Image: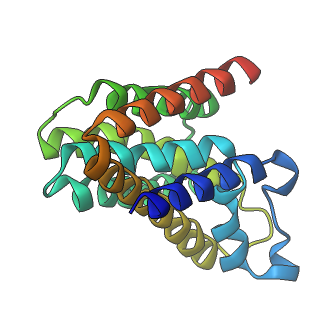
Amino acid sequence: MKKTLGLFWGALGMLVLASTPAFAHLDPLEHGSFVAGFSHPLFGLDHILAMVGVGLWASLLGGRAIWAVPSAFVGTMVLGFAVSMTPIGLPFVEPVIAASVVALGLLALVAVQAPVAVAAVMVALFALFHGYAHGSELGEAGAVPFMAGFAAASAALHALGVVGGVLAGRFTGPVAARVAGGVLALGGLWIAVGS
């Protein structure tokens, strides 16, 4: 089990190290719109940390939150993507995304125990901005396949956070997941300062 936990954190570390702005956008004409959408969250540090943070916090909440909180994020992110296709503008998109990483990390660090509905609404507020950002970077991609791609990748990153939190909990209780939340919060601060 320790080997599995080590593999999990190693995979997460490789994702973080591989994320650079230069790779954030695959050419949809060359790679396809779904692949371009799927790759988009995987090559942006802010997206990786936020998505893993949602899963990590959901694992600390436990029970129904394990699926409900990430589902609320993905569903609202799709709504934010749809909003970006309209003339409606959202202000402060990038600052809110950076703040979401800090907030989600802090929620895990402190292990805030919110009711599932409250937790779902909290992450949904951030998800609206994440989805809007994805839509504003659509480029030449087809909207529906691109959206399906980033939704699938986001759900996979949520699952990574949930599995990491659950596995860590088996060995250390909530300690390792809470420490990981602190690391995510620091990553969010680093992003905010660097922006």
At x 84%, y 57%, the residue is 23
Q: Position of residue 40 (x, y in %)?
A: 69, 60
At x 59%, y 73%, the residue is 149
Regarding residue 81, the answer to whether it shows in the image is no
Q: Determine whether, in the image, residue 128 is placed left or right of residue 130.
A: left
Q: Position of residue 86 (x, y in %)?
A: 56, 54
> In which quadrant of the rendered view does residue 90 lie?
top right
Q: Quadrant of the N terminus?
A: bottom left
| Front-lying residue, 143 or 100 | 100
Q: Quadrant of the C terminus?
A: top right
At x 14%, y 58%, the residue is 64
Q: Determine whether, in the image, residue 141 is placed left or right of residue 60.
A: right
Q: Where is residue 67 in the image (x, y as percent from the top left)?
A: 25, 62
Regarding residue 74, the answer to whether it shows in the image is yes
Q: Residue farthest to the top?
A: 193
| Front-lying residue, 9 or 83 | 9
Query: Does residue 179 lie above or below 146 as drawn?
Result: above
Q: Position of residue 190 (x, y in %)?
A: 67, 23
> In which quadrant of the rendered view does residue 14 lie?
bottom right
> In which quadrant of the rendered view does residue 164 lie?
bottom left
Q: Residue farthest to the front?
A: 2
